[in-house]
Image (cartoon, rainbow, N blue to C red):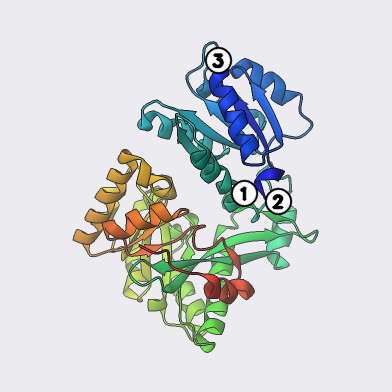
Amino acid sequence: MALNELQVMVVEDHGFQRRIALRLLAELGVQKVLEGADGLHALEVLRQQQAPPDVVLVDLDMPGMDGIECIGHIAQERLARAVVVVSALDPALLNTVQTMARAYGLRVLGSVEKPLTRDKLEATLNRFDQHAGEEPDDAAVEFSVEALVAALQNGEITAWFQPQVEFANGKVIGVEALARWERPDGSLVRPNHFVPMMEREGLANALTDRMLDEACKWKQRWDHGGHRLKVSVNVSAKALADPSAADRYQAIVESHDIEPEEVILEITESSVMSDAARGLGLLARLRLKGFGLSIDDFGTGYSSLAQLSQIPFTELKIDKDFVFGAHAQPRKRAVVEASLDLARKLGLTTVAEGVESVEDWQMLAELGCDVAQGYLIARPVPGSELQAVVNRWRRPAH
């Protein structure tokens, strides 16, 4: 979407600053604009709109209702498609506000430090299109358990793939398989809408088996085409309590003439400790069979260090919440740097999720991260489109 197609709202209590923001938007070709003189006024205007604006620029330090409370209302009432935090306050505070908004399910394009300039504003608004397109909206989706079971049986739930590339040479070396529900009407349902129900209804093992089978099927095709890639598949917490899972995964992989060493199973931090004895036993057996083990979303749980000392992981994935914007946020950068240092000392391959800007790419490369994954490289795509994505990819210049 071009900038002149965006509808943008400016929420700023200082009249002069608000006029500057409106003028900069006009210079960038943004024609559909709204304005709010403070948090309360902004909410009043937003609630009157027939459709939510694409982006709301929100100042934090405002009298009456501050920007933090305003963003909370925007997120909970779904009054905008995305927000940008605008402030001259402590970067740590800005990061906290962005994390809060994302926890509510609101897209955050980033933060812009005052004074606002055309270049800063243009770079931030251009991120809107980077996040759009895979699924147009994150609105709640209603469906029954029966519909979900039917979707799994009918092959509507499929694997899409997001490339992973080496920082050292820019080469695509692997993909992560991600579940997507492609409904008969052509719409896509995000996994955060249907995976929790699958967990509750005892369908998690079936989903993991489906993703592993599809990933291996596509890997076999890519291998035969001369592009040998490792595949990563997320393993459900429920699966870790199933003693038959290790033998079943081995059978699935070998049915496609693929070695377990070419498959990485991603485990979230919280999943192991739900049944520690069974979980540890299964992971040990998987490693014995040759599967790679990745600790996913590292740093977002409470038992990271304990698990790293107890489980034979081969890979550490740094969560996207730490990676996104880390080049401009010292606290995030410190967490990333510490994670990379720890992984090196433990002999683990490091993968950074959520790499969406050249600046973050360059920072991670300088810090010695091994592998990148994120929208800078490509969005998740169906297996049939992966080769075209790989062909288009170009490593950023240092």
- The correct choice, above or below, for 48 with respect to 392 in the image is above
Mark 2, residue position = 145
- Frontmost residue, 136 versus 184: 136
- The correct choice, above or below, for 300 with respect to 117 in the image is below
* Image position, residue 327 (x, y; %): 36, 47
- Frontmost residue, 278 versus 157: 157
Cα–Cα span, label 1 and label 2: 8 Å
Are the two marked residues, 3 and 2, in contact with CB atoms closer than 8 angstroms? no
Is residue 201 visible in the rendered structure shown here? Answer: no
Are the two marked residues, 3 and 1, in contact with CB atoms closer than 8 angstroms? no
* Image position, residue 191 (x, y; %): 60, 53
Residue 164, quarter of picture: bottom left
Are the two marked residues, 1 and 2, in contact with CB atoms closer than 8 angstroms? yes
Q: Amino acid at mark 2?
A: Val
Mark 1, residue position = 197
Secondary structure under the numbered disc 3 in the rendered image: loop
Q: Amino acid at mark 1?
A: Met
Is tag 3's residue or tag 1's residue first in the polypeptide sequence?
Answer: 3
Cα–Cα span, label 3 and label 1: 37 Å
- Of badges 3 and 2, nearer the viewer stands 3
Q: Is residue 183 left or right of 42 when viewed as pictured?
A: right
Q: Is residue 146 left or right of 85 when viewed as pictured?
A: right
Mark 3, residue position = 65
Q: How many marks?
A: 3
- Frontmost residue, 350 versus 302: 350
Residue 170, quarter of picture: bottom left
Q: Residue at x 47, y 61 (%)?
A: 235
Q: Residue at x 52, y 45 (%)?
A: 123
